[in-house]
Amino acid sequence: MDLLIHGIGKLVTPLGGGPAAGPAQGRLRVLEDAYVLIQGGRIAAVGQGPPPPFPGPGLDAKGRLVTPGLVDPHTHAVFAGTRVQEFLARARGERYTGGGILTTVAAVRAASEDELVALARPRLLRMLQEGITTVEIKSGYGLTPEDELKMLRAIRRLGEELPLTVVPTFLGAHAFPAGLSREEYLKEILEEMIPQVAEAGLARFCDVFCDRGFYTVEEARRVLEVGKEHGLLPKLHADELAGVGAAELAGELSAISADHLLHVSQEGIEALARAGTVAVLLPGTAFVLAEPYPPARRLIEAGVPVALGTDFNPGSCPISSLPLVMSLAVLRLGLSPEEALCAATLNAAAAVGLAGELGTLEPGKLADLVIWDATELGELPYFIGHRLALAVIKAGEIVWRSSGF
């Protein structure tokens, strides 16, 4: 679609086609009195002052703040049922161990593909209204070949039906199901699930929950290496519950991202920096679980590119607002608003292999952007929990607009 967005009070964007690391993560381009010209769904020009003559439709930003569309690089947004009782038990002081995953597994197995799509659709539309234009979604609540494929088909359908870029990730190695030994289930993943997922083209990435009580480093290495053989790029749930060496494995395998990292070691940080692996931090999960927050400043200072995600899921983090996560990143992780925006746009796009396509407002990239009810970037984390998006543009099309704007 062709569109001219004019009257932008302040346009703020990272730059580049790869993740920003170190001090570069806080260096953004800021243009006042700006415009964005969109042609064919991509950005044709970004400038200041009066826009060029344009015969197509226009959208007046009315002096508001404009940024790239937000990218959520880590969610479990396709699920059935809730885990309200687990949530309330934690609120009474009981420690989370991850055992509740199997509660969701039972609900997902009982649901049809159509039901999973119907349940997830309004969740994703709410995320769109928060300014999220790209979302990664993992399987991992099926834990059988049939149910993992069912989840991935539902994820694919959501990407086809909704005005969002949906990135699918295979997470068969999320937990161990009842009724099979560890080795029996690993054999199913390696010999059945990964080949079938790859043959059907249902996922771009392969992820493993490598942590205390879940998959060991050696088990995770086996799964990710077979995934790579089948064209699935490696990701890792790493060192969330304990430091087990998962970040070191992510660096060894040049994983595209290592996520959580609440208990990452210094050796793990150095391994991520050497590999250029994106650290996807999920402060909403630490908030919900009352766990230590990940060491964002140590990661940035070591040269590891840092991204932010919601980890939206029915158990450990029922938070689907990336702006809220940005607020937590500023308040609890020590990120500046500039670093938080880069983490939720360019670096998040890099964490799902799309930094060359989106995550910044530059000519040639997809025209994904948000007009916010704000005039300064600092207002986004400051107004905690407020829905500030006034208009969301996806590939040049206005896909959501607040009433009255």
Image (cartoon, rainbow, N blue to C red):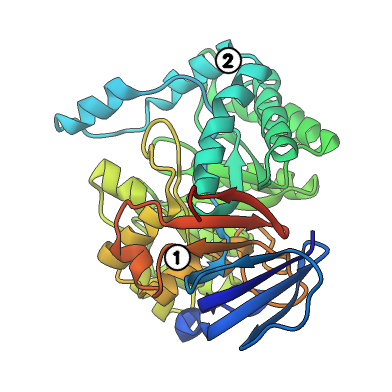
- Answer with the quarter of the image where residue 118 lies: top right
Compared with 397, 289 (above or below) is above
- Answer with the quarter of the image where residue 363 lies: bottom right
Expressed as whole percent of the image width and height from the top left, the position of residue 102 reads: 45, 21
Mark 1 touching mark 2, by CB under 8 A? Answer: no
Count of marks placed on residues? 2
Compared with 63, 240 (above or below) is above
Disc 2 residue type (three-letter): Arg
Expressed as whole percent of the image width and height from the top left, the position of residue 153 reads: 72, 29
Residue located at (54% from left, 32% from top): 122
Q: Can residue 315 be seen? A: yes
From the viewer's perspective, tell me whether residue 84 is left or right of residue 77.
left
> Which residue is the extreme one toward the left?
92
Name the disc covering residue 117, or none. Answer: none
Q: Quadrant of the N terminus?
A: bottom right
Residue located at (41% from left, 52% from top): 239
Which residue carries the number 1 mark? 268
Of tags 1 and 2, the one toward the viewer is 2
Assign a secondary structure to mark 2. Answer: helix
From the viewer's perspective, tell me whether residue 145 is left or right of residue 266.
right
Compared with 56, 302 (above or below) is below
Residue located at (55% from left, 24% from top): 119
Residue located at (68% from left, 45% from top): 163
Which residue carries the number 2 mark? 109
Mark 1 and mark 2: Cα distance apart in space: 36 Å
From the viewer's perspective, tell me whether residue 283 is left or right of residue 114.
left
Expressed as whole percent of the image width and height from the top left, the position of residue 336 reads: 35, 75
Decide: few, some or many residues near mark 1? Use Cα within 10 Å; few <14, some 14-19, many ≥20.
many
Assign a secondary structure to mark 1. Answer: helix
